[in-house]
Amino acid sequence: MNSTKGVFLMAEKTETKEKKAPKEKKVGEIAHYFGKIMVAAIKVKAEIKVGDTLHIKGHTTDFEQVVDSMQMEHQSVPNAKKGDDIGIKVKDHVREGDEVFLK
């Protein structure tokens, strides 16, 4: 009888040193856009603060901008938490349903 011995080959593990973009965190969704005054109403899903950089992305929307100010109920606020509805001035057209990410 032939006896066969198993041969184990060790595949050399190669690691690529690619720089991955930091994962963005979804913090909201565009609820409405007021075109004449270029203000986006955002339904907040995680904390957003003045000074944060947001990435707004949708079917035809894709831009980043820093939050210079935000309002709730016509009052300026320094931050917003999950469940809040805020308005921010945006530099480009956005659409309802566009997603808002924290950079």
Image (tube, rainbow, N blue to C red):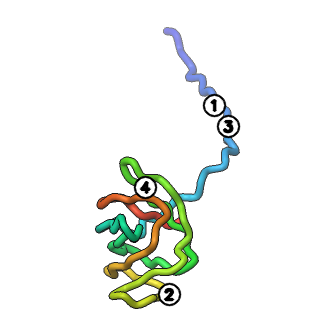
Q: Amino acid at mark 4?
A: Lys
Mark closer to the observer (2, 1): 2
For the residue labelled by badge 3, is the local secondary structure a helix, a strand or a loop?
A: loop
Residue 34 is situated, as x and y percent measured from the top left of the image, at 33, 68
Mark 3 — residue?
A: 14
For the residue labelled by badge 1, is the local secondary structure a helix, a strand or a loop?
A: loop
Mark closer to the observer (3, 1): 3
Residue 47 is situated, as x and y percent measured from the top left of the image, at 44, 78
The residue depicted at 60 percent of the width and 27 percent of the height is 8
Q: Answer above or below: position of 85 versus 31.
A: below
Label ID, residue 78: 2
Q: Answer above or below: position of 30 versus 70.
A: above
CA–CA distance in space, label 4 to label 2: 23 Å
Mark 1 — residue?
A: 11
Q: Amino acid at mark 3?
A: Thr
For the residue labelled by badge 4, is the local secondary structure a helix, a strand or a loop?
A: strand
